[in-house]
Image (cartoon, rainbow, N blue to C red):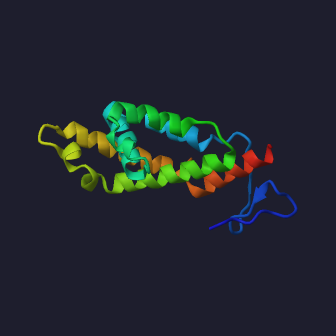
Amino acid sequence: MIYPVSSSNPKKIIPGKKSLTIKKNLKNPITAFIQWFNSLANTHKEYIAHIYFVLTTQDTTDLALDEENAFIRFQMFVTRQDFPLRVVARMVVIRSVMDFVFINRDQLAPDAVHGPDLIDIAEKQWETASNSWKNLRAKELSDPYIRLWLQAELASI
């Protein structure tokens, strides 16, 4: 759903009957994502970075990246500076891939997730990561929040 912008005040959006004033101090969605990502266990960060490139790359050499190099490339990819609209587009793609990864984790890498040598702690860590992802997804990575952030960014240009 796209919220209409008030013609009398272009810094307001009108979601249904309520209107929200655009706040100038909204956290950049990329910053929110990186803070969440950095809170994960190292093995989870490396796995997510690696699987992101496996799922999205058009360069077959990316498929040969080890998890450490995928992690480094992923952080560079996510954090590179860009125009606000391109930041939003990149975040929406990342958000979609992360949703897909968390929903299909068992099918994407069953041995990596539930290998015979892994203990219950790993599964609890994934559960915690999944819950924190859902929380982030509902707040700073929600469509309404991203829309507000983008409008605030564009208004400040």
Query: Can residue 97 be seen from the camera position used here?
Result: yes
Decide: is 121 above or below 143. above
- The spot of residue 107 in percent (x, y) is 25, 56
Which residue: 61% across, 50% down? 88
- From the viewer's side, name the closer residue of 136 and 116: 116
- From the viewer's side, name the closer residue of 97 and 129: 97
Looking at the rendered image, the quarter that the N terminus falls into is bottom right
Which residue: 70% across, 39% down? 25
Query: Can residue 141 be seen from the camera position used here?
Result: no
Q: Residue furthest right?
A: 8
- From the viewer's side, name the closer residue of 59 and 117: 59
- The spot of residue 76 in percent (x, y) is 51, 34
* Residue 11 falls left or right of residue 51: right
- The spot of residue 71 in percent (x, y) is 40, 34
Q: Residue furthest left?
A: 116
- From the viewer's side, name the closer residue of 120 and 53: 53
Looking at the rendered image, the quarter that the C terminus falls into is top right
Which residue: 49% across, 51% down? 95
- The spot of residue 40 in percent (x, y) is 38, 35
Decide: is 5 above or below 70. below
* Residue 128 falls left or right of residue 28: left
Labels in figure, total: 0
Decide: is 133 above or below 14. above
